[in-house]
Amino acid sequence: MATVEPKSLYNVNINEPQTAFFTVSIDTSGFLDTETVNGGRVSPCIANDFATKPTTLAQSLLVSRGSLRFKMMMEAISIRANPKLVNIVTTYAADEGDSPITQLDFGLVFDDKNFVPNTADNTLSDSTAVNTRALYLRDRIGDALNTTRTENMSIFDPTGSGNPQQLRNLEVTAGPVLTTSVGEIQEAITVTEVTTITPNTTNQLPTDNALSYAAE
């Protein structure tokens, strides 16, 4: 058996950046969903996305905390490069704002995989060495879900009268999704590199120049 490369017409230049595609899956079913700063979801969805909007302000704040956490995740994994977000799938028990999210899946496409470090310090669990790009992204996502941030956000308030009055600018605080056994945050996150998007033959594979540190 032999591999014949189409070099004459379709040669891939190894000097050009090689893209990378990662799938991210987060099992959110074990995260807190109490009406506190630690409760809430991890989701890009806002109140307007549901067929039935949140029925109380407290439930609406849970939705907003989920949106804030998703923003925090994207910021954490975009420190070195800005990925393209693709294939978002959110799984809820029902299409209503009072329902917690149980699963979040999405894809990340990086134009240059060398901007994604392949090593870092594992901040939530000492049992797993961070020695691949996928584990680096997993660690950054875990950091974001174990962080506290406060921002002013536009919140849907079902207690208001009339549509304009139902949107309020409120200070929202999103805290860690677990307050004990924080290592379980990492265990709920799965990041996988889809290697078939990159060249498979030796002449098309560039040297791995990934960053060997994560000095955030």
Image (cartoon, helix red, strand yellow):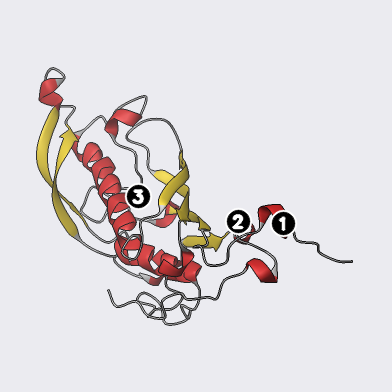
Q: Which mark is residue 197?
A: 2
Q: Name which residue type carries label 2.
A: Ile
Return the x and y of residue 114 as percentages of the image width and height. Answer: 45, 69
The reply to whether residue 160 is visible in this rendering is no
Q: Is residue 195 above or below residue 10?
A: below
* Residue at the spot 36% in from the left edge and 45% down from the top edge: 43
- Farthest residue, direction front: 8
Q: Mark 3 sits on what residue?
A: 42
**Label 2 or label 3, whichever comes before in sequence order:** 3
**Label 3 or label 1, whichever comes before in sequence order:** 1
Q: Name which residue type carries label 1.
A: Ser
- Mark 2 or 3: the one toward you: 2
Q: Is residue 182 above or below residue 44?
A: below
* Alpha carbon distance from label 2 to label 3: 28 Å
- Mark 3 or 1: the one toward you: 1
* Residue at the spot 57% in from the left edge and 66% down from the top edge: 14
* Local secondary structure at mark 3: loop
Q: Nearer the viewer, residue 141 or 92?
A: 141
